[in-house]
Amino acid sequence: MSYFTEVYIIQSSSDYRKFTVSDTEGVMIPQRKLPSSFSAVFFHSSDEHILHDCHLTSNCIFEFNTPGTPQIKEGIFPILRQTAPNFAIKSKDIEEIFNYLIGQRENLPSICYQSQEILPALLLLCQSYISIYSQDTKVSRSSWWLKGLGGSKDAQQHYHYLEQLLNSEWITPRTNNVYKDAVDTLMKNIFKSPSFLFSEASITPQTVRSAYKVIGDKLDIQPTKLVTNSIQTPFTWIVAVKSSLVSTSVATALSTLLGIPQLFLEENEHWHKLKSLKQSICIIPENQIELLPKLRLKGFSGAVLVLSSIPFSTLKQQHRVLRFGQGSHDCCESPWMLSILLEKVKELVPLEPENFKFLHKELRASQKLSDKQITSCLEDIKHLKNLPQEDSQKIQEIEKTLQKLMSDARVACHTIVTIGQESRPLQQHFQVALDEISICDRQQRQKAINRLEEAFNHLKYLLGVG
């Protein structure tokens, strides 16, 4: 209410509420009292039908969904931030939206752009280099930087990928509009040699300091005192998910400063080693926390540090797996600074055997329950296929089970999948199928049943059950 004098919430085609600065509790109003046009409209992907049914008009329409991955649609701006059950939208984002609406901001708000990966990763590697260069010159080797940027066997292909990513992130609107020449120079030096077998490019302090300043200005991060002393830790390994640049850069930085080796995980690769990595820290990005139950089930009992955009207290509400073991889980909020990461690591401890055993048992039971529920629904769908008419009782049973599954697996149900020729969030496929399954036309009903069956198979795959 600090920016808008009137806010309207439409919960259904018959539920309209008005909020004002003087009435923050809100009051029910009839549809005829809705404005003919709005300064901005915000809608959730699952409620798009309300937007169309109410014929709302606005020059600025924003769409969001739970994981923050709505499809790109003409005339609609996506909000690329997690929005439920807890919002990763901050007051600064609302201010940017407001300034955009009144014409004081030329570029789209930052929430309409993907979260950044390569810029925070480069910033962290620069911090590590400057902190340790005088004691350990291995940070001047281009191979060290390549590893921190999730280096692949094909360095040239990886360079082109990172170059495109850098260009994409650089156009994200920020307070400071600075030239990235110094960052381009650093990237070219890292990838100067196509083969690291016989010779490597050497990264100079001047190159790193110049890039560090430019990236800091671009991300609007104030200069901070860089780490000069390492810390003592009982951990013997740093484990990270390779598909995240932020994770690999954090793991490389911590590995270098702590003097312990690192292991990068591809999904389903090297997981056989996890049982032996009890004295290790797993670095995992917020958007891949759903991998953590799988890691635990594979035997990983080390500590976990989540790279997050929201506080740990909020993360724990969303992910029960983070609540086990006092001091075994924590998060570091962006912007990720080396000094703060080291402080977090200093406080972490591996899971105690009893806590790990208890967590493992609960995860097994949860996985078995999900498998049982999905299998039951698939059996009911087979039953529906063989009937010439609707079986309302079976459909109700499927709907009831599906509500529970969707509540327990929000991220999976908001994943965009393709069924037939349509790509949309999985939960929308479920809704469309259930809406059409009672249609009298037998061919249409059969199509809806097939969609429902395929949607459950997608959910089974995404949850890794069965």
Image (cartoon, rainbow, N blue to C red):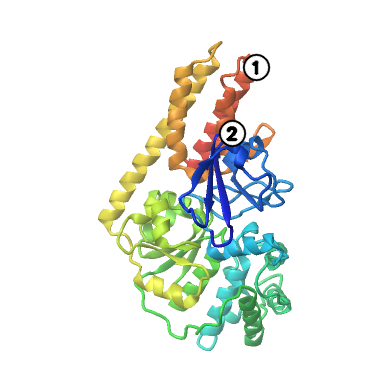
Which residue is found at the position 43% from the left and 76% from the top?
258
- Distance from the alpha carbon under mark 2 to that under mark 1: 18 Å
Image mark for residue 246: none
User: Please, is residue 16 above or below residue 2 in the view?
Assistant: above
Name which residue type carries label 2.
His
User: Please, is residue 205 above or below residue 361 in the view?
Assistant: below
Q: Disc 2 or 1, which lies upstream in sequence?
A: 2
Side (left or right) of 58 relative to 229: right
Q: Position of residue 212 (x, y in %)?
A: 62, 80
Name which residue type carries label 1.
Gln
- To which residue does mark 1 refer? 443
In front: 41, or 22?
Answer: 22
Q: Position of residue 379 (x, y in %)?
A: 47, 23
User: Please, is residue 393 above or below residue 418 in the view?
Assistant: above
- To which residue does mark 2 refer? 429
Q: Position of residue 26 (x, y in %)?
A: 48, 48
Q: Residues within 10 Å of mark 1 (few under 14, many from 20)?
A: few
Which residue is found at the position 53% from the left and 79% from the top?
128
Side (left or right) of 64 relative to 357: right
Q: Position of residue 9 (x, y in %)?
A: 55, 45
**Secondary structure beneath label 2:** helix
User: Please, is residue 242 above or below residue 406 in the view?
Assistant: below
Which residue is found at the position 40% from the left and 75% from the top?
343
Q: Quadrant of residue 187?
A: bottom right
